[in-house]
Amino acid sequence: MYTAQDEQRLYQQAKTLLSADSSNLEETIQQLREVINYADWKYYVQSEPVLADFEYDTLFKKLTHLEGQYPEHVSADSPTQRVAKGLSERFPTVSHLVPMLSLDNTYNADDLLDWDRKCKEFAGTENIEYCVEPKYDGASISLIYENGTLVRGATRGDGVMGEEITTNIRQIRSIPLSAAFAKSNVNQIEIRGEVVIHKDVFAEYNAQRAAEGLAPLANPRNAASGTLRILDPKEVSKRKLSAILYHISYYTSDGTPDMLHTHYDSLNWLYQLGFPTPVKEMKRFNNINDVINYCAEFEQHRDDLAYEVDGLVIKVNSFDMQDKMGMTSHHPRWAVAYKFKARQATSKLLRVEFQVGRTGSVTPVAKIEPVPIGGVTVSSISLFNEDVVREKDLHIGDTVLVERAGDVIPYIVKPLSELRNGTEEDIVFPTHCPICNEALEKPEEEAVWRCINISCPAQVVERIIHFASKDAMDIRNMGDANVRKFYELGLLKNIPGIYTINWEEVAKLGGFGSKSITNLQTAIDNSKQQPLNRVIYGLGIRHVGETMAKTLANAVDHIRDLYDYTEEMLLALEDVGPKVAATVMHFFHTPENRHMIDLLEQAGVNLTNQKKAAPASGELAGKTFLFTGTLSRFKRSDAEALVEEKGGSILGGVSSKLNYLVVGEDAGSKLEKAKKLGTVAILTEEEFMSLAGLNG
Ligand SMILES: [Zn+2]
């Protein structure tokens, strides 16, 4: 069909057309057609989109616009003159009773205002009721019921013809195999909808693929559409697909049943008959401005839904009005999609940089041509480790598909290997630290290469930053930038150096007023009184997080007691395994680290367990607490600090040792577990406050 060279050329052509037109009109039109045909083939036949929706729509609109301006250039084979062709040959092809047109897309309030004007024009009235529902990101299907029984399920295909996949459709539990249409005298009915995969199911499925050494699927939509076309129905059943039905496209009956006058009523009726329709999410509005506000508001919460949603669909509610308005050759006039900001884009992998972290781990970071995704410009993406790079088969110079979904950090879904031209280069992992040139090591069971030079400048800086950070010594105003600056200027060489900074030298630097220096000095001074667990956490011992640091601090009177801890003694502590025991022993037996602890002591930093020194007293003495859900009156860390201040302690999970579970909003599994145990007292925030002696 398309050779690899064709694919490269057409992809480049698409990118060029997105930014500029050729000076020759005829050539531009020809190029647009070529590119759109190619994109359609990738999307519908290969199920491997090469363009982001927004890019595709921009090109399609450009072509439609040019053909509108110069009708003499319109030809019968232009992609604007038909709905996209292309079907796989694995399933029998069937005709839809009514063509499945795609919806026109809108991207902003102006587009919607424009659409509203056209609706009023075609409907011949100013009073239009709109119905708004989520636009599910899945695979479109059509279902036909005759005399109450599901007789056919089909994919959308090219809109006119689809693939008959009835057997696979029957595997989807949410689709009724029969329904009481006869009660309303409806004989034959065609219902449209979307097959989707629950986000949790998708995540689980990808985790399983990863475990089997397979590449993860790009998104739930691809997973849904791919699954529908699997030849083995049993396998389809295992994938736990869901469906959401949102449109009655055709029916035969004696007269018009009452509930088939509006879209809103029709979906409620289907819901009553047992169909999954978006009745809960569906909203009605009497004017477009309310629709626009709702769209903006909904976009903020798109990640709260169980399914991927890539926009909203706005429909004219009245069926009579819909009939009156009719359709263009591509789109119904009475419905439009409002698309949320795109979360996928393609870009070019320019180079890979290797960053050295606090523990010496060397992380490959992809530098890509900056590309806007979902409202931010992405230019730098972590590739985690060598295995990820090898699994994805990434090369320098690759065109890559980048996704940034929800609050997930951006990641490279895959390279578009069909666009390679042979100039791509392997990603070469360094054998030596890019900062200090020490030979890198990789323990057999780990995926990460490490620089083991304890004085590696990259690690030293990261360690100082960690020591000063909020969860460790909480030295406010210190910040990453200051640490880096002081280090580069030789004013700060290691962790204890924080307490001996030459402030006269700092005052000579630009950007430090006497006020900001005083603030910084105060913050550093205050940090000397931090409890021992924060010091231990701040030292950045591998595998020692905040909770583990507390365990270690609680076990001793002074940090030096840990010098004498044997492996058995460490393993006897809660949650300490062989890994932690080994790194803790190694840390406290390293002479440089002992020297650092001496310097901290000389600087006046607290290294004793004050809590143990003074036996627990206070309102919460001896009691154990755990917080769950979103607290409205406290920050979680403040609430925990309060418990400890009052003599109580915080546990890491629900167990028989737990006395109190304090429950905020949206509490989940911890609450369930505590209820099951039956021995845990469950408190609201208010009850907790009065228990702690705070009368709020
Ligand atoms: Zn190094």
Image (cartoon, rainbow, N blue to C red):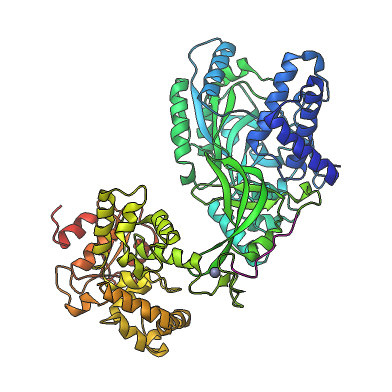
Where residue 430 sits in the image (x, y, percent)? 65, 66
- The residue positioned 30% from the left and 81% from the top of the image is 555
Residue 98, quarter of the rendered image: top right
Where residue 358 sits in the image (x, y, percent)? 47, 67
Where residue 601 sits in the image (x, y, percent)? 28, 76
Which residues fall within the magenta stretch?
425-433
- Kindly give the residue lying farthest to the top in the view shown: 124
Report the quarter where the N terminus lies.
Answer: top right
Q: Is residue 77 visible?
A: yes
Nearest the viewer among 31 and 502 is: 502
Q: Is residue 426 magenta?
A: yes
Give the side of residue 127 with respect to residue 652, left or right: right
Identify whether 163 is placed above or below 593. above
Where residue 584 sits in the image (x, y, percent)? 42, 80
Give the side of residue 343 with respect to residue 667, left or right: right
Nearest the viewer among 441 and 107 is: 441
Magenta stretch mostly in which secondary structure?
loop
Residue 640, quarter of the rendered image: bottom left
- Name the quarter showing ligand 1: bottom right
Number of numbered discs overlaid on the protein picture: 0
- The residue positioned 52% from the left and 74% from the top of the image is 453
Q: Is residue 191 visible?
A: no
Nearest the viewer among 561 and 29 is: 561
Q: Is residue 428 magenta?
A: yes
Give the side of residue 557 with respect to residue 542, left or right: left
